[in-house]
Image (cartoon, rainbow, N blue to C red):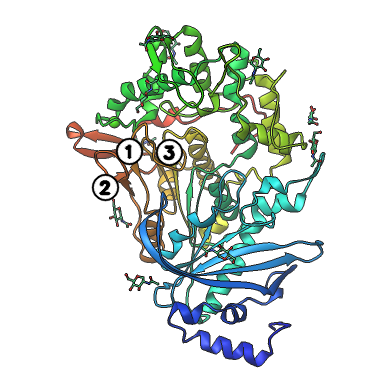
Amino acid sequence: MRSFIWLPATAVLAALAEATTLSTLEELCTESIAQAALPPSEFIQGLTIDASSVTTNIVTNDSVSGNDYPNAVISYCNVTLAYSHDGIEGDQVLLEIWLPAPSDFQNRWLSTGGGGYAINSGDTSLPGGIIYGAASGMTDGGFGGFSDQADTALLLANGTLNYEALYMFAFKAHHELSAIGKAFTRNIYGLADSTKLYSYYQGCSEGGREGWSQVQRYGDEWDGAVIGAPAFRWSFQQTQHLYSNIVEQTLNHYPSPCEFDFIVNATITACDPLDGKTDGVVARTDLCLLDYNITTLIGETYSCAASRGSPAVNGTLTAETIEVAQTILDGLHDSEGRRVYFSYQPSAAFDDAETQYNSTTGEWELNIDQLGGEYIALLVNKNGTTLSSLEGVTYDTLKDWMISGLLEYWSTLQTTWPDLTPYHNAGGKIIHYHGDADYSIPTASSVRFWESVRTTMYPGQDYNTSSDALKDWYRLYTVPGAGHCAPNDAMPNGPWPQTNLGVMIDWVEKGVVPTTLNATVLQGENQGQNQQLCAWPLRPLWVDGGETQECVYDQRSIDSWHYDLDAVPVVVY
Ligand SMILES: *[C@@H]1O[C@H](CO)[C@@H](O)[C@H](O)[C@H]1NC(C)=O
Ligand SMILES: *[C@@H]1O[C@H](CO)[C@@H](O)[C@H](O)[C@H]1NC(C)=O
Ligand SMILES: *[C@@H]1O[C@H](CO)[C@@H](O)[C@H](O)[C@H]1NC(C)=O
Ligand SMILES: *[C@@H]1O[C@H](CO)[C@@H](O)[C@H](O)[C@H]1NC(C)=O
Ligand SMILES: *[C@@H]1O[C@H](CO)[C@@H](O)[C@H](O)[C@H]1NC(C)=O
Ligand SMILES: *[C@@H]1O[C@H](CO)[C@@H](O)[C@H](O)[C@H]1NC(C)=O
Ligand SMILES: *[C@@H]1O[C@H](CO)[C@@H](O)[C@H](O)[C@H]1NC(C)=O
Ligand SMILES: *[C@@H]1O[C@H](CO)[C@@H](O)[C@H](O)[C@H]1NC(C)=O
Ligand SMILES: *[C@@H]1O[C@H](CO)[C@@H](O)[C@H](O)[C@H]1NC(C)=O
Ligand SMILES: *[C@@H]1O[C@H](CO)[C@@H](O)[C@H](O)[C@H]1NC(C)=O
Ligand SMILES: [Ca+2]
């Protein structure tokens, strides 16, 4: 039974009957039509949808551009609504759903996610669904409003986490967004029960983690999930942001950003040809890791102009600076030399290591990476959102934070449950991509999860058999030269997979398997050029003097992505 306090049942039915014949955005986009299409409150146990909260407005001919969809001009109906969780005083969760005109609607729903501590990406990700005829939604997670991030809600008082907010951020809010959004979409476009509503997800970074949070828990929520560089394995991922700082502190050496920049440039130059094509792009960071040694840079001259309040610098690279950089590349080891975690691929920027200039002393000094600092302050210490000191913090402290966080946040933020059987059984597909030069989430983090799913779901099968079985429905692609969820100015000729949702739709709805992932060079001299990305575990190799790309099986390269985390006494998926 529908329960509306403000509309007589006959008016609801009339509005619904009308809804089945709507054809223009103007007809669709009214408060009464949207209110009549709300699912009944008892649709999800414990939720009350507030019909009086509904707002609608039409947006016409909006020019949109982003990394996750081609440039377009779109028109849509913007609907917002609020609901609350029964039993929580003052609770309010907002959803924003964009609807294409009925004539453009193609029986699709798209959920979108956020980044950092944000659970949505504002207006930047919803166009990606409208372009493909999908009703597209985002949530505010109940954190106060669409621009309020989870971190503003996670601490009730020093020492007291808001566990409802934590669970909302971790996975609940997205489950509710999909459930309400899909039901609302069916109602407002008047889909018959027998008509399939295809359901998708698209998100990168924290948005990637949010995508996995659903795929790992709810088998039938989506037909296809497009997931980039996910910020999962939370306690490891967040803590590792502090590793570069602790290397600098432990070795008591603080290189200038110019020195790190020089090392990155030299690495790109040296490793570019290893993929068979000298195009300024390191497509084989694995060969770079195996075959290039930055110690050869000791004694080379660097210089940078003044910028952002920092003076011009120049000098020659010292053995101390190379030791800092190499230790960062080696990844975290504990005081007994055992491996705790891994690092970014060579050619990635040393973002976490960035030092700050002290004009009093004329020296470069420690600059605490607050992506990592916030995790420790907020979710480990539970008394703030920035970490003001790393005094006394050692490699072993980082290890302890990773392991204790694995236990504390296993069922919420960790998000590495490797058994995807329900999702697979429901026919779900996954496109997972990760920039090879990601400087914020190690590319090997995504490889590790794919491999964990492979060994969990296909135990006892040899590598190729299990890989092929997994690739039937879950495919991972590394993106040559790309940074974190975006193309990379340092390797402008690199491709970027901008049409992932279109590719996913073709896979789900037409059975077109993305053997390679469609990508486009988005800047530089080759702007507009199409390239195809190889699916893990195959690696790209240019042949015929750089004319043709092949996807090759290279055992030595594959092995370089696998790490034995022997310092951690439990399985790390
Ligand atoms: C939107 O663009 C179309 C096609 O260019 C045009 O016909 C229409 O008038 C525009 N609508 C508005 C409101 O600008
Ligand atoms: C959508 O509606 C909400 C609520 O009225 C408003 O704050 C937001 O700016 C609207 N967005 C667009 C793109 O119209
Ligand atoms: C926690 O303690 C810090 C430092 O004493 C204080 O600035 C902050 O306001 C407190 N936060 C809360 C949520 O009480
Ligand atoms: C690194 O290369 C970029 C061009 O990609 C250049 O702008 C920058 O100055 C170089 N940095 C150093 C330290 O050589
Ligand atoms: C790099 O070269 C140095 C000096 O030859 C050597 O000590 C070091 O082990 C090498 N590192 C790697 C990762 O191969
Ligand atoms: C290096 O810096 C010094 C002053 O700090 C300046 O005199 C010199 O010209 C610079 N050299 C280069 C190659 O930029
Ligand atoms: C710069 O160094 C001085 C002397 O060590 C110190 O007192 C000051 O706090 C530093 N400034 C900053 C911004 O860290
Ligand atoms: C926050 O908690 C940590 C760990 O308990 C403690 O060391 C630190 O002093 C606290 N910071 C503040 C500002 O209260
Ligand atoms: C897996 O298949 C590739 C060809 O795609 C082959 O070169 C390789 O030897 C096989 N690996 C194993 C472990 O069987
Ligand atoms: C693949 O990318 C090209 C541009 O590089 C684009 O024209 C084409 O439509 C894309 N294919 C799909 C399936 O989206
Ligand atoms: Ca290259």
Question: Does residue 515 appear left or right of residue 18 in this picture?
Answer: left
Figure disc tally: 3
Q: Residues within 10 Å of mark 3 (few under 14, many from 20)?
A: many
Please say if the residues under marks 2 and 1 sit with CB atoms less than 8 Å apart. no
Q: Amino acid at mark 3?
A: Gly
Measured Cα–Cα span from mark 2 to mark 1: 11 Å
For image coordinates 80% across by 61% down, the residue present is 88
> Mark 3–mark 1 contact, CB under 8 Å?
no
Amino acid, disc 1 = Gly
Q: Residues within 10 Å of mark 1 (few under 14, many from 20)?
A: many
Q: Which residue is mark 2?
A: 528
* Quarter containing the C terminus: top right
Q: Which residue is mark 3?
A: 435
| Image location (x, y in percent) of residue 435 | 42, 38
Q: Is residue 242 visible?
A: yes
Q: Would you say the beta carbon of the disc 2 residue lies within 8 angstroms of ligand 10?
A: yes
Q: Which residue is mark 1?
A: 494
Q: Amino acid at mark 2?
A: Gly
Q: Label 2 neighbourhood size at 10 Å, few (<14), some (14-19), many (20+)?
A: few
Secondary structure category for the residue under label 1: loop
Residue 364's place in the image compared with 177, above or below, is above
Residue at image location 71% in from the left, 74% down from the top: 42
| Residue 518 location (% of width, % of height) | 33, 50
> In terms of depth relative to the viewer, which is nearer, 98 or 230?
98
